[in-house]
């Protein structure tokens, strides 16, 4: 390539309003993808893909045809490998896309939750140091997880909730899944998070709570069997709460009906892990 070809390549064309809008939309999509990937195993994958794309354009500019052919040939296999290795992260990205305000406005249905029984049950189990994992369904259905447990379809109540998690009962091992005012199933097994930096003080219940909130928009309440501490998980983040009031406030904030949150502005920097 001659210097004239290089200058023609970097020559800035005329830019219209449509071009600017196109650039802004693509930039926002990439920004949101990086926010979703931040702190996950796929973050390093995204960095590697960005490097390969940059390397491809460098090879194209400099005329390295063999490298262009190699990158073009193996791109199909790379895509398949990414889907297989990072299926959990991809599910999370698609789930978050379907859970945006735009799609919720078309698919949202009225959700009324009963906080009192959940809070009272969690506090009672905490005082007795009885382990518990309570998963509360929001806009994304959890049918796939209820099917591997024991179906109950029972009205949510404090007595039933605390009875299920008693060590001598057959249903205490696993999670309880709640939909509005109904306990759908008990003894449900959930996917465990693969986060390598999670503290070793957290056991299987905590890892399951993080795992289910990584793949869905559900909210999970965890009671530690060893310490009696109450934690909650949402969006793949685990938050330790101080008392019943903190749990009540958290559930009220996270589980309020979608229509009440429709006009709330969701800014990226507000999605940081909450401090109790």
Image (spheres, rainbow, N blue to C red):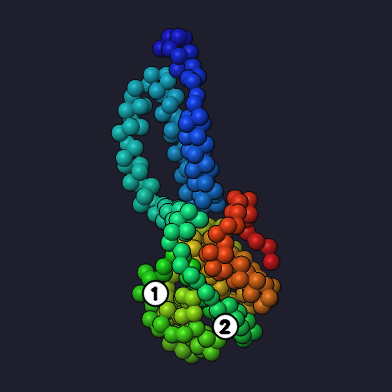
- Residue 187 or 178: which is nearer the viewer? 178
x, y (%) of residue 170?
Answer: 43, 87
Residue 117's tag is 2
Whichever of callouts 1 and 2 sits on the residue coming sooner in the sequence is 2
Q: x, y percentage for residue 21?
A: 50, 34
Residue 271: x and y, percent? 60, 55
Q: Which residue is mark 1?
A: 146
Identify whether 219 is placed above or below 33. below
- Which image quarter holds the C terminus? bottom right
Question: Looking at the image, do the residues carrying marks 1 and 2 touch, with CB atoms under 8 Å apart?
Answer: no
Q: Residue at x 33, y 24 (%)?
A: 66
Tag 1 secondary structure: helix
Q: How many marks?
A: 2
| Secondary element at tag 2 | helix
- Rendered image quadrant of residue 245: bottom right
Can you say whether 93 is above or below 29 in the image? below
- Picture residue at 41% right of the left edge, 67% below the top: 141
| Residue located at (44% from left, 39% from top) | 49
Give the Cα separation between the discs numbered 1 and 2: 20 Å
Q: Is residue 170 above or below residue 56?
A: below
Residue toward you, 19 or 49:
19
The image position of residue 101, as x and y in percent, is 51, 56
Nearer the observer, 256 or 90: 256
């Amino acid at each position: 390539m001659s210097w004239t070809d290089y200058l023609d390549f970097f020559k800035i064309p005329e830019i219209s309003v449509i071009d600017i809008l196109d650039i802004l939309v693509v930039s926002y999509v990439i920004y949101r993808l990086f926010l979703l990937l931040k702190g996950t195993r796929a973050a390093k994958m995204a960095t590697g893909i960005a490097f390969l794309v940059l390397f491809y354009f460098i090879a194209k500019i400099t005329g390295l045809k063999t490298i262009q052919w190699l990158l073009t040939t193996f791109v199909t296999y790379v895509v398949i490998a990414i889907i297989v290795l990072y299926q959990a992260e991809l599910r999370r990205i698609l789930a978050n896309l379907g859970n945006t305000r735009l799609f919720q406005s078309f698919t949202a249905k009225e959700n009324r939750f009963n906080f009192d029984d959940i809070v009272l049950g969690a506090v009672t189990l905490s005082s007795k140091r009885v382990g518990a994992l309570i998963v509360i369904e929001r806009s994304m259905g959890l049918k796939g997880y209820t099917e591997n447990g024991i179906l109950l379809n029972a009205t949510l109540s404090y007595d039933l909730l605390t009875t299920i998690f008693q060590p001598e009962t057959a249903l205490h091992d696993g999670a309880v899944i709640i939909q509005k005012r109904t306990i759908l199933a008990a003894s449900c097994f959930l996917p465990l998070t693969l986060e390598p930096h999670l503290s070793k003080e957290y056991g299987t219940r905590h890892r399951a709570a993080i795992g289910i909130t990584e793949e869905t928009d559900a909210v999970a309440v965890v009671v530690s069997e060893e310490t009696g501490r109450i934690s909650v998980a949402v969006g793949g983040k685990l938050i330790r709460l101080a008392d019943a009031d903190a749990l009540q406030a958290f559930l009220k904030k996270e589980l309020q009906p979608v229509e009440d949150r429709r006009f709330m502005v969701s800014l990226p920097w507000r999605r940081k892990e909450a401090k109790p």
